[in-house]
Amino acid sequence: MNTYTAKQVAEILQREDPQMNLRTVRYYTQIGMLPPLELAGNRRVYTDNHLHHLRAVLVLSKSGETLASAQEKLAGLPLEEVIKIGEHLRMYQSGQLLHNETHAVSEDVVLSVSPRISPALKEKMIATVTRLLQEEGQK
């Protein structure tokens, strides 16, 4: 497993989210948003697991969660689930969602469609998801 200093973690995450910085990494560590740091010799270090947790915190906070609720959601989650949440960070990069069309298909499903998708395909996608939701509701 790779080990990192707080500065290295901040630099890695800053490439993925320009708002991330060393101060934020230290703050999240201090308030317990992350698992306890590992010991390497007599130094406390960050690991890949900490990177995964930080990515997940970023995704949850960008999706409107408070830090307290993000911490609550991540507490006790298996690492695989934390990684899945963190993988959504790229959706928030470069304002990608701001450029997409958003379609609320139901109360529980929202589609974000790139402008590169043709209008005909977009309509098929919406119709298909709507149909699947209706079928699921009939079961």
Image (tube, helix red, strand yellow):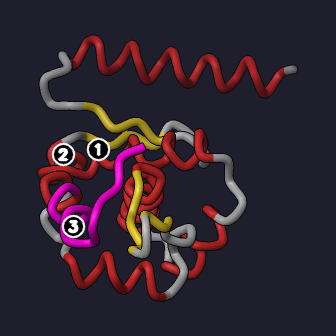
Give the residue pinned by disc 1. Answer: 91
Q: Nearer the viewer, residue 93 or 5?
A: 5
Q: CA distance from mark 2 to mark 1?
A: 6 Å
Q: Earlier in the sequence, mark 2 or mark 1?
A: 1
Q: Position of residue 44 (x, y in %)?
A: 42, 73
At horizontal 60% and vertical 48% (from top left) the residue drawn is 107
How far is mark 2 from mark 3, CA to CA? 22 Å
Mark 1 secondary-structure assignment:
helix
User: Which residues, given as a range, are shown in magenta?
Assistant: 1-12
Residue occupying image coordinates x 41% and y 18% = 125
Residue 127 rendering spot, x and y as whole percentages: 48, 18
Which residue is at the far right? 139
Residue neighbourhood size for the residue with mark 1, other residues' Cα within 10 Å, grouped as few (<14), some (14–19), many (≥20): few
Q: Nearer the viewer, mark 1 or mark 3?
A: 3
| Image height of 74 relative to 88, above or below | below
Q: Which residue is mark 2?
A: 96
Q: Quadrant of residue 134?
A: top right
Q: Nearer the viewer, mark 2 or mark 3?
A: 3
Q: Residue at x 21, y 41 (%)?
A: 100
Identity, as a three-letter code, of the amino acid under mark 3: Ala
- Please name whichever residue, 12 or 92, is drawn nearer the observer in this view of the structure: 12
Count residues near mark 3 (Cα–Cα under 10 Å), then give few for <14, some for 14-19, many for 20+: many
Q: Is residue 55 rendered to the left or right of residue 108?
A: left
Three-letter residue code for mark 2: Gln
Tell me whether the residue at label 2 lies in contact with that at label 1, contact meaning CB atoms closer than 8 angstroms: yes
In-image side of 105 versus 72 (left or right)? left
Question: Which quadrant is the N terminus positioned in?
Answer: top left
Tally of marks: 3
Q: Which residue is mark 3?
A: 10
